[in-house]
Image (cartoon, rainbow, N blue to C red):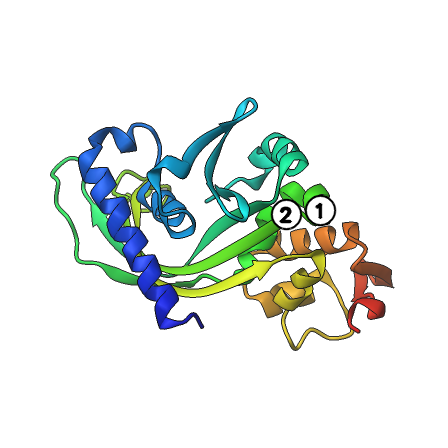
Amino acid sequence: MVSIYEKEKFLEAYEKAKAYCSENPTIGILSEKIMHLTLKYYFSPFDSDHEVKLGGFYADAINEDGIVEVQTRSFKNLKEKLMYFLAVTNVNVVHPIPFHKYITWVNPETGEISKPHRSPKIGRLTDIFGELYGIKEKLDNPRLTITLMLIDTDDYKNLDGWSKDKKKGSTRAERYPRELIDIFTINSKYDLLKLLPEDLPETFSASDLNKLMKGNSRNSYSAINTLCYLNLCECIGKEGRKNIFRIKKENLL
């Protein structure tokens, strides 16, 4: 769990983001969502250190440790940017993971807004594996840090989906941070092993890992693929049609 200091620092960054948005009403048009902006202020509190041009790219922010890139989704889109930035300095890729989501439904036709309710789905740090697969070639670079931010959120969603109640396939209007719950930092490829379930058996299949991670199969298959690519995991055979894996023992020392 994070300290009171970190929670207060996060709330202060959120207040800065809200103030900036109120002063710059076109921010939504520019696709800079408030969660993204909050995390920029958390790691780099000064506006002058945001959106800094380096070569042919813009860094979300810079601070005394290097470049900060806030990535809410699609890590694979970072590849070209990371290749350039990592050749220049240290890079911290910050990724928010919603822990508890409080959902409010908005009717885009009438403007009616529902009362918020908490989603039964809970975010987990292991959700990151589905994204890390997209930059697995960069995960062994000593200049790269990945910071996972587990955050309670308020999600406002439009009733514009394809189902009868218009909820399935709906679009999210905005995601507001509510509270910082936890921070996990990946400084080297070995830190990825700390994300694995503590009760993971010595040998396991992808389906075994998926059950323990309690997520979707994309995360478990991506985890195994990424760990094998980084030489942290290996396939040792088959049981029927299932591949059986183990974490390399030398990495557990």
Q: Is residue 75 left or right of residue 70?
A: right
Say what secondary structure mark 2 lies in: strand
Q: Where is residue 154 in the image (x, y as percent from the top left)?
A: 28, 55
Q: Is residue 80 above or below residue 208?
A: above
Q: In this view, does 103 lie above or below 196?
A: above
Q: In this view, does 82 lie to the left or right of 37?
A: right
Say what secondary structure mark 1 lies in: loop
Q: Is residue 119 above or below residue 162?
A: below
Q: Where is residue 238 in the image (x, y as percent from the top left)?
A: 85, 62
Give the numbered dot on residue 238.
Answer: none
Q: Which residue is at the front of the view, 126 or 89?
A: 89
Point out the image quarter for the C terminus.
bottom right
Does residue 213 appear in this view? yes
Identity, as a three-letter code, of the amino acid under mark 1? Asn
> Image point 68% across, 65% down: which residue?
193
Q: Position of residue 100 (x, y in %)?
A: 36, 63
> Image point 81% across, 55% down: which residue?
231
Q: Which residue is at the front of the view, 19 or 119?
A: 19
Q: Which residue is at the front of the view, 22 or 125?
A: 22
Q: How crowded is mark 2: few (under 14 residues within 10 Å), some or many (20 or more)?
A: many
Q: Position of residue 213 (x, y in %)?
A: 59, 66
Q: Name the residue under label 1.
A: 141
Q: Which residue is at the front of the view, 176 or 102?
A: 176
> Image point 33% across, 28% down: which residue?
30
Q: Mark 2 points at which residue?
A: 144
Quarter of the figure with residue 135: top right
In the rendered structure, are the residues bearing label 2 and label 1 in contact, judged by CB atoms less than 8 Å apart?
yes
Q: In this view, does 175 lie above or below 122?
A: above
Point out the image quarter for the N terminus.
bottom left
